[in-house]
Image: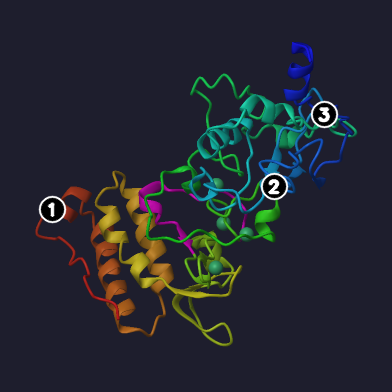
Amino acid sequence: MDSMDIDHSNRVEPPLLILRPVNPMESGQGLPYAPENWPNPGDTWHWRAGPRVSSKGHFVDRYLYPPKHLPGLDTEIMPKNKVFRSKLSLDRYIRRAFPDADVRKFFASFSWKIPCRDGVMHQKQALLPVYSSDEDPMHDNGSDIVVCKAGNHNCGSLMPQSESDTLPSMPCNICCGEPTFCSDCSCILCCKLISLEHGGYSYIKCKALVSEDHICGHVAHLNCALRAYMAGTIGGRIGLDAEYCCRRCDATKDLVPHVNKFLEICQTVEYQGDVEKILNLGICILRGSQRENAKELLNCIESTVIKLKCGTNLEDLWNGDNTPNIWSGTFP
Ligand SMILES: [Zn+2]
Ligand SMILES: [Zn+2]
Ligand SMILES: [Zn+2]
Ligand SMILES: [Zn+2]
């Protein structure tokens, strides 16, 4: 046996991939667009193409779903969806979870790029930030901007897991099946991004337990919820009392603890217009409530708004003798 033979027997030839062009949103399993039999025989990865196509005719967004049993997926940067959206995040994951794996061989075993059948440019969508799906995983210069599914680099899902007391959001293929809808930052009512500004006062996250180890996790703008009669005090069949009702899971959430943070948040806000906006939202949420703690908080917020309207400036409002009694009730 000569050395050529040995070399040949040890080498795994990359499979010859025939890249069949696919339609936007098309999905499939295994080759050529997802790994097969990796890390173990029978392990199948799934792929899905997004809606956007680059000028070269490849999909800008493509999703790779690993077999669910793979280790270390919970610590991945977007733990809740268990899907890779960039070669870079996949590369990082493979190196961390399988330190002995041949990463080059892994990437050579399937095609990251997916050609689009008609090569249509979706101009409108192309204006959104683009995932770095064309980057070379071997040359991570650390300067790529990581964005979530909704193209938001400020998304809570990208933050280090500070909310360690929070369970992961439920897997969802209703709204979250949409390629640009992110359960962490897309409003479930208008699909636009939520804002983390001013302590995130303007949105509410549903933390209802939907299974043993998942919360609902969907978010909504409070203004959208008020307009849709899914927040505030609403009589009749809806029956909300300073509460929020999640459209995704139907759970009801008390909004008094949320609004209770508003006065404190306002003390860190620089512009009076913003303070008024925050307090007015609080008033809209609490108005009409029959509950004592909600009424008490409403009084406190309303008196603060009156002081502002009477010309008290912010500094005097928080520092002077006019300090509002920041309501400090406790919740049952
Ligand atoms: Zn969803
Ligand atoms: Zn997001
Ligand atoms: Zn909204
Ligand atoms: Zn919910």
Q: Nearer the viewer, residue 276 or 92?
A: 92
Q: Quadrant of the C terminus?
A: bottom left
User: Which residue does the numbered mark 3 point to in the structure image?
Assistant: 15
Numbered disc 3: secondary structure:
loop
Tag on residue 144? none
Q: Give the extent of the magenta segment.
A: 189-205
In the image, taking residue 123 as reference, residue 74 lies left or right, namely: left
Please determine whether, in this image, residue 105 is positioned above or below residue 307. above
Q: Using the numbered discs, state the Cα–Cα distance from disc 1 to disc 3 in whole angstroms.
A: 71 Å
Q: Where residue 146 sits: x, y (%)?
A: 53, 34
The residue at the point 57 percent across, 52 percent down is: 186
In the image, taking residue 329 as reference, residue 21 lies left or right, namely: right
User: Which residue does the numbered mark 2 point to in the structure image?
Assistant: 179
> Where is ligand 4, by quadrant?
bottom right
Q: Nearer the viewer, residue 229 or 89?
A: 89
In the image, taking residue 163 as reference, residue 126 lies left or right, namely: right
Q: Nearer the viewer, mark 3 or mark 2?
A: 3
